[in-house]
Image (cartoon, rainbow, N blue to C red):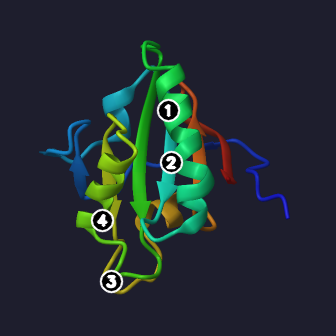
Amino acid sequence: MNTTTQKIFKAPEFDVKHWVDANGNKTKQLKLSDFNGTFKVLYCFQSWCPGCHSVGLPNLQKMVTELKDNKKGTFLAIQTVFEGFHANTYENMLETQKKYDLKIPFGHDAGADDASRSNIMKNYQTGGTPWFIFIDQNENVVFADFH
């Protein structure tokens, strides 16, 4: 089933409360507007997701490495917890960042206490993990798909 976004839509503001910087240190809550004028790649994962480790994170690692000197692009990884709450913790998110030596901001989106889907999943219409979202310089979601 092809779940690629068929229609461009305006990217909603991030609603992720817990962030770490490229070095794994707690940082302020990041906003979409913090990255104005850049092409943004959001990678949604869960630390217990086999596909995230076998395909998604290695692909993200390659992209980050190849484009590390490109100032027109921004990479962000967000753990979008929708199941396995006991395993997809903030601490395991940090371990994932270290394991893949990804020097990019990571967010932990456990969603609302009364919801089974993370805020990013709801706001960006994602369907699971691993999931890539591409946001252009004009804040339009131009790609969103399971990979």
Instruction: Please report whichever mark, 2 or 4, sits nearer to the chain's N-terminal start.
Output: 2
What is the CA distance from the residue labelled 4 to the residue labelled 3? 10 Å
Mark 2, secondary structure of its residue: strand
Query: Residue 129 at what x, y percent from top left?
Result: 57, 63
Taking 60 as reference, is 94 above or below it? Answer: below
User: Residue extending furthest right?
Assistant: 1
Q: Which is closer to the viewer, label 2 or label 4?
A: 4
Q: Which residue is mark 3?
A: 86
Query: In front here: 44 or 62?
Result: 62
Mark 1, secondary structure of its residue: strand
Instruction: Please report whichever mark, 2 or 3, sits nearer to the chain's N-terminal start.
Output: 2
* Residue type marked 4: Asn
What is the CA distance from the residue labelled 3 to the residue labelled 1? 30 Å
Label 4 CA crowd tier, 10 Å (few <14, some 14–19, many 20+): some
Q: Which residue is mark 4?
A: 92
Instruction: Please report whichever mark, 3 or 1, sits nearer to the chain's N-terminal start.
Output: 1
